[in-house]
Image: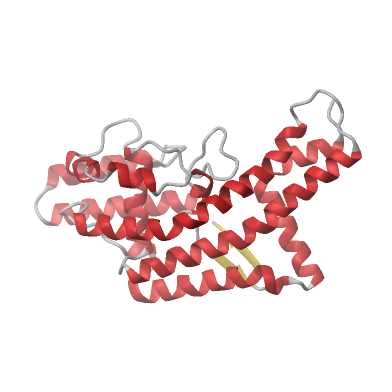
């Protein structure tokens, strides 16, 4: 049977590690180095919201995904790709937890602390990189005149509905994941807004397709629209011309944070 130290390392994971690290930072009063990228991410979110409103304010265009907007989205993604290797390295650090679980013998104290050091080093890197990529993303969105709602709309339809990537797999990419409640609510709201816009133009049959799919999200674990059926033809046709370029700017270990938002409350930060 695995010992307490091994169980803790294997079971803790990214969320636990980040929470522990941030608590240590606050207790030691050494928060500036780690909280600076988080503060910058929060400030860039505010700037983006001032220009484009909140994500749920976006109304997807009735003319679908135009070439101009897809080009803008891909430009944002290109800005993020230099950070991909950092997330691959961080994921490698977390693999230290799993390495302990591969052997049948009880790990020594030295092995436990060596793995713990690797994990905590990765957690520190993750905190910094998470804030930085969100700031990079937000600044790139400002430059491309795109709000977080439109970015989420294109991202979900392209990567999750069309290409079939599971959401929020991220650093610990094993069994796949689901969108969180905030993301599910946003995706559903955007689909309803799109359906309403189509109905206003008299395109009631198309509107009904989106409404029915939005209703299905209420019972979906993953929150991925059109997970068990094909995307509407006008959407998949627009995306097909960009297939290779979408694949080139997707980073699996970074995907858990691609649609993330940083919330600040007092001295603490929360990513969702």
Extreme-right residue of the structure: 109
Q: Which of the image's four quarters has the C terminus?
A: bottom right
Q: Is residue 180 visible?
A: no
Image-based side of 217 in relation to 210, left or right: right
Provide residue 232's location: percent of width, then percent of height: 21, 39
Instruction: Work out whether 228 lies above or below 149.
Output: above
Instruction: Work out whether 200 lies above or below 105.
Output: below
Which of these two is toward me, 66 or 49?
A: 66
Q: Give the residue at x 43% y 48%.
A: 184
Q: Give the residue at x 85% y 39%.
A: 111
Would you identify the image quadrant in which residue 129 lies? bottom right
Q: Give the residue at x 75% y 66%.
A: 25
Q: Is residue 3 visible?
A: yes
Image-based side of 65 in relation to 6, left or right: left
Which of these two is toward me, 112 or 19?
A: 112
Provide residue 70's location: percent of width, then percent of height: 26, 55
Q: How many marks?
A: 0
Image-based side of 134 in relation to 239, left or right: right
Instruction: Work out whether 133 lies above or below 89.
Output: below
Extreme-top residue of the structure: 104
Q: Which of the image's four quarters has the N terminus?
A: top right
Q: Give the residue at x 68% y 45%.
A: 93
Provide residue 126's location: percent of width, then percent of height: 63, 56
């Amino acid at each position: 049977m695995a010992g307490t130290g091994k169980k803790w390392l294997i079971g803790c994971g990214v969320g636990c590690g980040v929470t522990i690290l941030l608590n240590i930072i606050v207790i030691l009063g050494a928060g500036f180095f780690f909280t600076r990228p988080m503060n910058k991410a929060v400030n860039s979110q505010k700037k983006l919201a001032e220009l484009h409103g909140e994500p749920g304010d976006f109304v997807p265009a009735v003319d679908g995904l135009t070439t101009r907007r897809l080009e803008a989205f891909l430009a944002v993604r290109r800005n993020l790709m230099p950070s991909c290797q950092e997330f691959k390295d961080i994921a490698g650090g977390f693999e230290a937890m799993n390495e302990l679980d591969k052997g049948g013998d009880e790990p020594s104290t030295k092995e436990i602390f060596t793995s713990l050091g690797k994990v905590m080093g990765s957690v520190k890197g993750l905190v910094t990189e998470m804030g930085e990529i969100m700031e990079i993303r937000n600044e790139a969105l400002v430059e491309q005149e795109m709000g977080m709602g439109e970015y989420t709309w294109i991202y979900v339809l392209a990567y999750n509905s069309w290409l079939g990537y599971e959401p929020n797999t991220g650093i610990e990419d094993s069994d796949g994941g689901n969108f969180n409640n905030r993301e599910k609510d946003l995706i559903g709201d955007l689909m309803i807004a799109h359906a309403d816009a189509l109905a206003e133009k008299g395109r009631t049959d198309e509107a009904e397709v989106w409404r029915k799919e939005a209703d299905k999200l209420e019972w979906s674990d993953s929150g991925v629209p059109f997970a068990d059926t094909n995307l509407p033809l006008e959407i998949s046709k627009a995306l097909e011309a960009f297939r290779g370029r979408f694949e080139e700017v997707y980073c699996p270990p970074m995907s858990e944070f691609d649609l993330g938002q940083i919330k600040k409350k007092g001295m603490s930060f929360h990513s969702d």
